[in-house]
Image: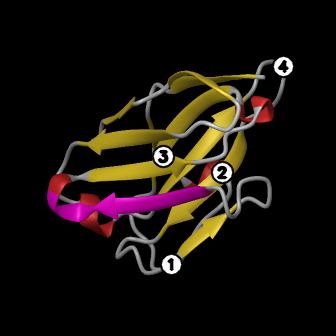
Amino acid sequence: QVQLVESGGGLVQAGDSLRLSCAASGRAFSTYPMAWFRQAPGKEREFVATISWSGGITYYADSVKGRFTISRDNANNTVYLQMNSLKPEDTAVYYCAARAGGKSYYVKEYEYDYWGQGTQVTVSS
């Protein structure tokens, strides 16, 4: 069983930056593709960014490309989401997700096996 704990959310103004962290338990973290998803009020959860097990492949939703950066530290079982130039439409609960294996990158919710509880990000205009 893998436990994921997100942190780093908060209330910021448009144009500000935040860095989200996701700490994972378990020895197999370095083999897991990881991702961030988000869910805004009244909307379905959507894909934000993903990173392969090695960190060599990253992929982003068009809405965040060029502003967000996903990275990972396998030595410390942590994945990050650096969010720059935040917009009010980025307001959502952000979830970390882990997939138990795979050599590629994955963008669908059903492709992930473990989820964190989420961290709230609110961007005021």
The answer to whether the residues at label 3 and label 1 have Cβ atoms under 8 Å apart is no
Q: CA distance from mark 3 to mark 4?
A: 21 Å
* Residue 92, disc: none
* Residue 97, disc: 3
- Disc with the residue nearer the chain's start (3 vs 4): 4
**Dot in front, 3 or 2:** 2
Q: CA distance from mark 2 to mark 1?
A: 14 Å
Q: CA distance from mark 3 to mark 2?
A: 11 Å
Q: Which residue is mark 2?
A: 48
- Residue 40, percent across and down? 75, 26
Q: CA distance from mark 2 to mark 4?
A: 17 Å
The residue lying furthest to the right in this view is: 42
Q: CA distance from mark 3 to mark 1?
A: 16 Å
Q: Secondary structure at mark 4?
A: loop
Given the image, on which type of amino acid does mark 4 rest? Gly
Given the image, on which type of amino acid does mark 3 rest? Ala
* Residue 57, disc: 1
- Residue 37, percent across and down? 62, 43
- Disc with the residue nearer the chain's start (1 vs 4): 4
Q: Quadrant of residue 99?
A: bottom left
Given the image, on which type of amino acid does mark 1 rest? Ile
Q: Is residue 28 left or right of residue 16?
A: left
Residue interval drawn in magenta? 68-75
The quadrant of the image that shows the N terminus is top left
Q: Quadrant of residue 61?
A: bottom right
Q: Nearer the viewer, residue 12 or 78?
A: 12
- Disc with the residue nearer the chain's start (3 vs 2): 2
* Residue 42, disc: 4
The answer to whether the residues at label 2 and label 4 have Cβ atoms under 8 Å apart is no
- Disc with the residue nearer the chain's start (2 vs 1): 2
Residue at point 71%, 62% (across, down): 65
